[in-house]
Amino acid sequence: MDLGFGPEPPWFEAVLSVLAVWRLARLVARERGPFDLVSRLHVAAAGTPLADGLACVHCLGVWLAVPPAALLAPGWVGGLLLWLALAGGASAMELAVGERS
């Protein structure tokens, strides 16, 4: 996939995807979001099984990693491996910097 940044190394898209998955998961789980949109989502989900998943960065990372893995991987085996790698990378990012902010 050509992102338009010029000739990037082969791992560039995966690293960029890990950062994007982590940032989105952290936004939904820990922040209010622009115009309190994320807060409204949490209020709407309160009392449902979805509420616990929306409060967990690691859980959200698993689901948010699906689209980039499906777009970047060449086949279903590669997609499965990339999905787990992106979710694991997002979890590692949260463990590394999550408590500091």
Image (cartoon, rainbow, N blue to C red):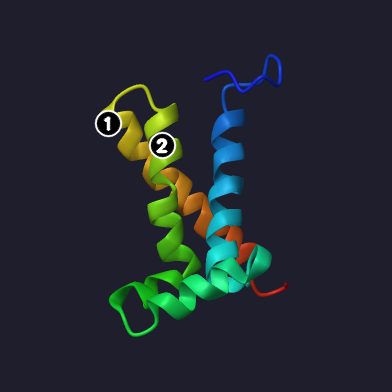
Which residue lies at the image location 53% right of the left edge and 70% below the top edge? 29
Residue 76 versus residue 52: which sits nearer the camera? 52
Whether residue 16 appears in this view of the structure is yes
Labels 1, 2: front one: 2
* Percent position of residue 7, x then y: 68, 14
Q: Which mark is residue 45?
A: none
Q: In this view, does 10 lie to the left or right of 67?
A: right
Alpha-carbon distance for marks 1 and 2?
11 Å
Q: What is the tally of numbered marks visible in this picture? A: 2
**Looking at the rendering, in which quadrant would you find the C terminus?**
bottom right
Q: What residue type is labelled 2?
A: Ala
Residue 78 versus residue 51: which sits nearer the camera? 51
Q: Is mark 2 on a helix, strand or loop?
A: helix
Which residue lies at the image location 61% right of the left edge and 55% below the top edge? 23
Is 63 above or below relative to 2? below
Q: What residue type is labelled 1?
A: Val
Instruction: Report which residue position mark 1 lands on.
Output: 77
